[in-house]
Image: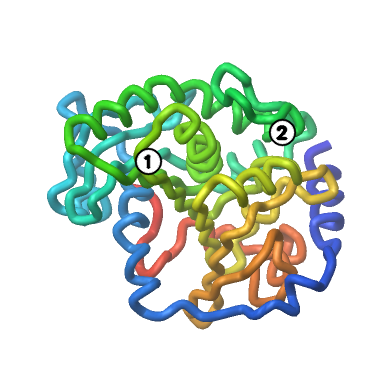
Amino acid sequence: MRASLLTLLSVLAATRASPLFARQSITALTASQVAAFKPFSFFASAAYCSPSSTLSWSCGANCNANSGFIPVASGGDGASVQFWYVGFAPAQNTVIVAHQGTDTSKIEALATDANAYMTSLDPTLFPGVSSSVEAHEGFAGEQAKTATQILAAVRSAIAAHGATHVTIVGHSLGAAIALLDGVYLPLHVGGVTFKTIGYGMPRVGNQAFADYVDSHVALTHINNREDPVPIVPGRFLGYHHPSGEVHILDSGTWVSCPGQDNTSDQCTVGDVGNIFEGNTDDHSGPYDGVRMGC
């Protein structure tokens, strides 16, 4: 059953959308633009590490790369609930919300499973969002487990540090949860600006979801080379990526891919036609030298 589903997914994921996006300009990021993402890559990687009861991390270079970081709250068990943490980064002048990802085999299984249905967003968590905006049921369930705790921690961090910016990061499943937090948190917190940075992010919702994100969320989702995770779940299931893709080419050049699910061969959908053309080793990075995980 799994093999047949993955085969069907692979064939249909290769279906090309309108060539319009492919004709739009694919632009290379400058060295300074790439470098600006590196602190957030480290923050996303650090989410894989179990925080101690004292809210400190001692898991190596990735966790300690951003000196001066001030933890505020953390949670999760790394199994039934992904690790997460909230803190303040003085060097970047932003509150950080970070979500742990998962290994490639698990995220592919979750994203491609036959019961990967979409569901409307919970109106108690997402008040005022249309019921036509739907997200992957599994991803939405994971985000709901920690939503209110993270909201309380973000409010505390803002109050404690007089913060005016919040940055939400995550890799893999963590990127999917981060995107849902990027929709959720601004509905409950005013007076600050939000941005979301996801790495190796699977598709999270339907066309209405992608359109909502484009209108309401400052999103960048970064995909590395032939990582297959960003092409699942398949578009034939009704899933669509929002805009904001940055693709790391085999040459190491980072390029900006305009539009949703850009089909240029310089962007993920055009470069990775199906999961058999992907390379799971690319999922963890490197992202400008940073590999995700402890």
Per the image, label 2 sits on a secondary structure element best described as: strand
> Could you tell whether 38 is left or right of 272 in the image?
left
Numbered circle sitting on residue 98: 1
Q: Quadrant of the N terminus?
A: top right
Q: Is residue 46 left or right of residue 116?
A: left
The residue indicated by pointer 2 is 134
Dot 1 amino acid type? Ala
User: Of callouts 2 and 1, which one flags the residue occurring earlier in the amino acid sequence?
Assistant: 1
Q: Nearer the viewer, mark 2 or mark 1?
A: 2
Q: Is residue 38 above or below residue 107?
A: below
Snapshot quadrant of residue 160: top left
Q: Position of residue 15 (x, y in %)?
A: 85, 62
**Residue 109: x %, y % from top left:** 66, 39
Instruction: Look at 62% across and 21% down and name the residue there.
Output: 122
The image shows a total of numbered marks equal to: 2
> Label 2 amino acid?
Glu
Estimate how packed mark 1 is, as few (under 14), some (14 to 19) or many (20 or more) residues with alpha carbons within 10 Å. many
